[in-house]
Image (tube, rainbow, N blue to C red):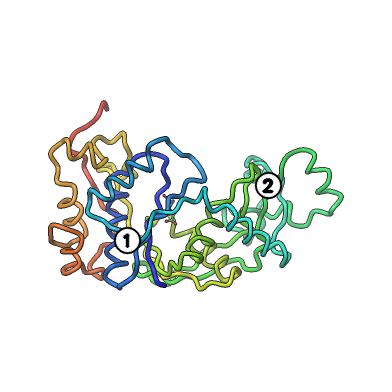
Amino acid sequence: MSAGRYAPSPSGDLHIGNLRTALLAWLWARRSGRDFLIRVEDLDRVRPGAEQRQLDDLRALGLDWDGAPVRQSQRLDLYEAAIGRLEGEGRVYECFCTRREILEAPTAPHHPPGAYPGTCRDLTEAERAVRRAERPAALRLRSEVATFTVADKLHGTYEGAVDDFVLRRGDGVPAYNLAVVVDDGAQGVDQVVRGDDLLASAPRQAYLATLLGTAPPTYVHVPLALNPAGQRLAKRDGAVTYAELRDAGVDVFALIADSVGATGSSPRELLESFDPAALSTQPWVFDPPVSSGR
Ligand code: GLU
């Protein structure tokens, strides 16, 4: 199977930039004859009711998907199995560092800023036993590369850092980077269209995919929506959700279709004129029509 997907986190309502990314993911998948899947990434920051509203908004936009949406919270066994496999290969180690300790640790010259400096990588068993009594361990990947290169349809060849990133957090929750790779592999996702804020994560994920025996997907990191001040679009900017914009008299579908340079009154109709090569890699600036309590 060959599929694309949209994978929202139900931490709040989707704004028009998210909806635009979802439509682009749908267009990319459908124009290449792929299935289109919805995956609810609910391991973290879940707001009650948000998942239903997100799915309703995607439907209101005219998007359809294959099969029922899956929820990451119902797939914990898969993530644990992947961690077990990596553990069996000696690719996992316990990390006891707090966020603060990581920030304050001296960084090795070849480590990019923000990369895990490797503090717990070579602890002895005795040292680990002492630290285990202090706090629960996170699990990190013992990465064997410093960088990894991915292919992106908009950004071309992109090389980025791969550090010993977290696979399972100290609170026991599988990390986003692990879950996304396990799910894409298990669901046959070979095309990942998402916001370009995640471009820098793609090398880590692609590397992990190879360790888990799946080919990295084709990536398409699409530009985010910004407000007129050049900041990432957010709720405080005014009417940004489907419901808010509709109530303000905006034809949300027409607006998004126009922003991706396609014409038509349904996603299917857009397929005729949608030209991925013409899509800008520049952010999409959106000026919300009404302000809500600014
Ligand atoms: N759940 C992530 C988000 O909403 C997207 C992850 C992905 O597409 O890989 O930002």
Residue 86 located left or right of residue 258: right
Q: Quadrant of residue 83?
A: bottom right
Residue drawn at 15 percent across, 52 percent down: 254
Q: State if disc 1 and disc 2 touch (CB < 8 Å).
A: no
Which residue occupies 40% across, 54% down? Answer: 69
The one of 208 and 186 positioned closer to us in this rendering:
186
In the image, 109 versus 34, the foreground residue is 34
Using the image, tell me which numbered label, if any, was put on residue 153: none
- Residue neighbourhood size for the residue with mark 2, other residues' Cα within 10 Å, grouped as few (<14), some (14–19), many (≥20): few
| Location of mark 2 (residue) | 105
Ligand 1 under 8 Å from disc 2 Cβ: no
Position of 203 relative to 57 (above/below): below
Q: Amino acid at mark 2?
A: Ala
Q: Position of residue 109 (x, y in %)?
A: 64, 59
Pick the quarter of the image with the N terminus.
bottom left
Q: Residue furthest front?
A: 67
Q: CA distance from mark 2 to mark 1?
A: 39 Å
Name the amino acid type tagged 1.
Answer: Ala
The percent coordinates of residue 17 (x first, y second) are 29, 49
Q: Nearer the viewer, residue 115 or 50?
A: 50
Question: Height in image: 223 above or below 50?
Answer: below
**Image side of residue 133 versus residue 152, left or right:** right
- Name the residue that disc number 1 marks: 25
